[in-house]
Amino acid sequence: MHERLRIHHGVGSRVLFDSDQGDHPFTYESTGSGWTFHIKTEKTPAVEEVLRLKDEINLFIFKEEGGKAVEKVWFYTGDGSVSYLDDESSLVIAASRQIAYKPGDFER
């Protein structure tokens, strides 16, 4: 199973960052109060835009098999921190809640 990370602007849902657009390995782990994401990336204009809009982003993990999403997980970042670690070339995002959606959940 392939996991794809996308960061969208909360207003209009414009894609700000997509882990599949270049070599952007990422990890995420559950912490006591939520989840922490570490995304290896240079400080590109896209990353600068994520940092500028850090209070207005939506973070999604798309779990894909055979090129099709089998689950989409939305992580709430509104009360979390978003920062860039220059010494690690990493974007770090904290999220407090998540909601998972499976294709067909809302279809009849």
Image (cartoon, rainbow, N blue to C red):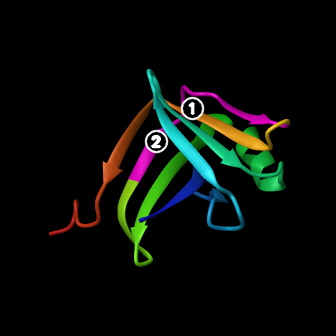
Residue 9 seen in this snapshot: no
- Indicate whether residue 37 is drawn in magenta: no
Asked if 78 appears above or below 71 in the picture, the reply is: above
Image quadrant holding the C terminus, namely: bottom left
Q: Residue farthest to the bottom? A: 66
Q: Could you tell me the amino acid type at mark 2?
A: Phe
At 62% from the left edge and 66% from the top edge, which residue is drawn?
20
- Percent across and percent down for residue 5 are 55, 55
The stretch of residues the image draws in magenta is: 73-86
Seen from the viewer's position, the closer of residues 36 and 88 is 88
Asked if 18 appears above or below 99 in the picture, the reply is: below
Q: Quadrant of residue 66?
A: bottom left
Residue where numbered disc 2 is placed: 75
Q: Could you tell me the amino acid type at mark 1?
A: Ala
Image quadrant holding the N terminus, namely: bottom left
Residue where numbered disc 1 is placed: 94
Within 10 Å of the Cα at label 2, are there few (<14), some (14-19), or many (20+) other Cα atoms? many
Q: Earlier in the sequence, mark 1 or mark 2?
A: 2
